[in-house]
Image (tube, grey):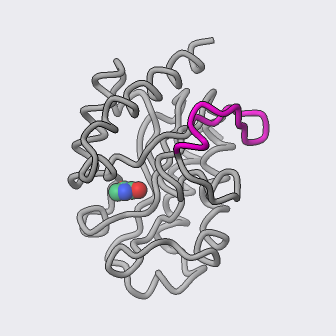
């Protein structure tokens, strides 16, 4: 089956998913979107309010910051695939729980194996936890050699972290450029 069709099938499965209790409180599940042949998959934490309302990833404030960072790194949304570890919004945007991550990860794994990207970019601590299991500070994970079944992982800050520290924008751009370099190898 073509990658596009396979991704569509996964998205349908996500929208109908009832693997955890977040299914009860969501408005829309957010499977993710982007190029089916993307060399880079960006993995966030979980949908927020705007994403839950629209069923699309990174469409709120964090999305605007992400778009700016992508542009500064010479990338755009059409080239990459954007998703998150949790496909449904946790109530009041609380942190994802371990059982929710475990229930949701098979969807992410299917997306990764379908797209077969060259690089995975984990946005924030929970993006990283979804991929490597461990919960460590971003500052400790940045620049480390990590991989997921042989696919290199670039860990960077979550775009929402910029709200509290504008200086991190530069670091996200640096990390996205590194991802782009790895993807072009
Ligand atoms: N934060 C995320 O991790 N994902 C979104 O889609 C929006 C905000």
Q: Is residue 24 positioned above or below 171 on the image? A: below
Residue 153 lies left or right of residue 40; in this view the side is right
Nearer to me, 92 or 149: 92
Q: Position of residue 116 (x, y in %)?
A: 66, 34
Q: Which residue is found at the position 26% from the left and 53% from the top?
A: 164
Drawn side of residue 89 relative to residue 39, left or right = left
Q: Nearer the viewer, residue 116 or 142?
A: 142
Residue at x-position 60% and y-position 69% = 101
Within the image, what quadrant is residue 80 found in? top left
The x, y position of residue 21, in whole percent, is 52, 86
Closer-to-camera residue (164/59): 164
For the point 56% across and 52% down, which residue is it? 137
Q: How many marks?
A: 0
Q: Is residue 87 left or right of residue 1?
A: left
Left or right: where 76 falls relative to 166: right
The residue under the point 41% across, 62% down is 30
The residue range painted magenta reads 139-154
As drawn, the residue found furthest toward the top would be 185
Q: Quadrant of the C terminus?
A: top right
* Residue 12 at x, y percent in the picture: 50, 63
The percent coordinates of residue 145 (x first, y second) are: 70, 31
> On the rendered image, what quadrant is the N terminus found in?
top right
| Ligand 1, image quadrant it occupies | bottom left
- Residue 75 lies in the magenta-colored region: no
Residue positioned most to the right? 149
Q: Is residue 147 magenta?
A: yes
Vertical arrangement, residue 107 with respect to residue 180, above or below: below
């Amino acid at each position: 089956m073509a990658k596009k069709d396979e991704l569509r099938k996964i998205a349908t499965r996500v929208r109908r998913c009832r693997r955890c209790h977040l299914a009860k409180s969501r408005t829309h599940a957010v499977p993710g979107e982007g190029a089916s042949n993307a060399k880079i998959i960006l993995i966030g934490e979980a949908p927020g309010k705007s994403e839950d309302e629209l069923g699309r990833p990174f469409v709120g404030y964090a999305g605007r910051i992400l778009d700016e960072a992508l542009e500064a790194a010479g990338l755009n949304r059409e080239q990459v695939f954007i998703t998150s570890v949790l496909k449904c919004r946790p109530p009041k945007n609380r942190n994802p729980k371990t059982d929710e991550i475990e229930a949701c990860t098979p969807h992410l794994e299917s997306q990764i194996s379908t797209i077969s990207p060259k690089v995975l970019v984990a946005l924030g601590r929970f993006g990283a936890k979804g991929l490597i299991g461990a919960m460590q500070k971003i500052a400790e994970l940045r620049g480390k050699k990590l991989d997921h079944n042989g696919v290199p992982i670039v860990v960077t800050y979550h775009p929402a972290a910029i709200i509290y520290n504008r200086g991190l924008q530069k670091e996200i751009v640096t990390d996205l450029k590194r991802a782009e370099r790895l993807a072009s190898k």
